[in-house]
């Protein structure tokens, strides 16, 4: 979820050197976000603060580098305020694994597709938004799916929501790409079958790597 939107946006527009600086900033920003979330969840204990400072400074320096290289990219910053705020507020309330927090994180991550596309000088913004929307739809589905195989395993309500969401997503992508319908149909099948098995978190994670690659490659090839 962290790397894929960046890669998809860069590949869709064409990789440029500025993408390296953007990637460094993006990963440092995530580390700062994660460390801050841990600090807030701990009740602001002092021993969790040093990583926040280190990663925040690193992200700030790399952010200034990106701004120097491509000052026009700063216009994307407001789009990340809400997802970031929801995530941090959830961490402070010790609800960082809640549904709103998970969905906010997926939306924020998917928005990086647009920034990376802009960095590469892409001009077909209909395609860029569709790529971001497809990734958001997929990653939002993983929020439901992962709950059904780990924390909410055996909960019928979560299972129904997960399968239902995937069915709706498969129907929605039919508007833009039939090959994506096949991919999302397979994702729906996995959402229906895997929670009924004894799959381990490691096996689920490996499966999601394959699923992410399938969604990204198919979206790039057909949109």
Image: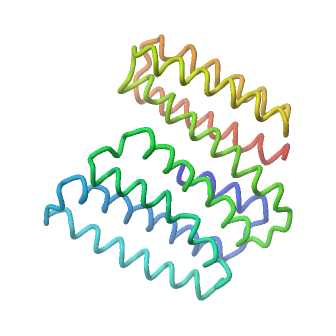
Q: How is the image coloured?
A: rainbow
Q: Residue at x 49, y 18 (%)?
A: 159
Say above or below: 124 vs 25: above
Residue 28 position within the rendered picture, expressed as x and y whole percent measured from the top left: 44, 68
Residue found at the far left of this picture = 46
Rendering quarter of residue 99: top left
Say above or below: 108 vs 25: above
Indicate left or right for 179 with 103 as reference. right
Rendering quarter of residue 30: bottom left
Q: Residue at x 46, y 26 (%)?
A: 203
Q: How many marks?
A: 0
Indicate left or right for 78 with 59 as reference. right
> Which residue is more in the foreground, 186 or 174?
174
Residue found at the far top of this picture = 196
> Which residue is more in the foreground, 20 or 30?
30
Q: Residue at x 42, y 55 (%)?
A: 86
Residue 6 position within the rendered picture, expressed as x and y whole percent measured from the top left: 63, 59
Residue 73 position within the rendered picture, expressed as x and y whole percent measured from the top left: 65, 77
Residue 216 position within the rendered picture, expressed as x and y whole percent measured from the top left: 70, 44
């Amino acid at each position: 979820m962290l790397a894929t939107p960046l890669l998809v946006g860069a590949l869709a527009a064409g990789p440029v050197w500025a993408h390296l600086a953007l990637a460094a900033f993006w990963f440092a920003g995530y580390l700062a976000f994660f460390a801050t979330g841990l600090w807030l969840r701990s009740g602001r204990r002092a021993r969790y603060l040093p990583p926040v400072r280190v990663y925040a400074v690193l992200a700030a320096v790399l952010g200034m580098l990106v701004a120097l290289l491509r000052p026009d990219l700063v216009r994307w910053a407001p789009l990340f305020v809400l997802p970031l705020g929801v995530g941090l507020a959830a961490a402070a309330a010790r609800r960082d694994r809640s549904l709103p927090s998970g969905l906010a994180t997926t939306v924020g991550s998917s928005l990086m597709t647009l920034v990376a596309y802009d960095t590469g000088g892409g001009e077909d913004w209909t395609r860029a938004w569709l790529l971001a929307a497809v990734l958001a739809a997929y990653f939002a589905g993983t929020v439901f799916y992962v709950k059904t195989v780990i924390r909410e395993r055996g909960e019928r309500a979560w299972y129904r929501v997960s399968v239902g969401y995937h069915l709706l997503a498969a129907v929605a992508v039919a508007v833009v790409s039939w090959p994506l319908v096949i991919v999302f149909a397979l994702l729906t099948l996995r959402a229906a079958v895997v929670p009924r098995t004894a799959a381990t978190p490691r096996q689920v994670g490996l499966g999601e790597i394959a699923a992410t690659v399938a969604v990204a490659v198919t979206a790039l090839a057909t949109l």
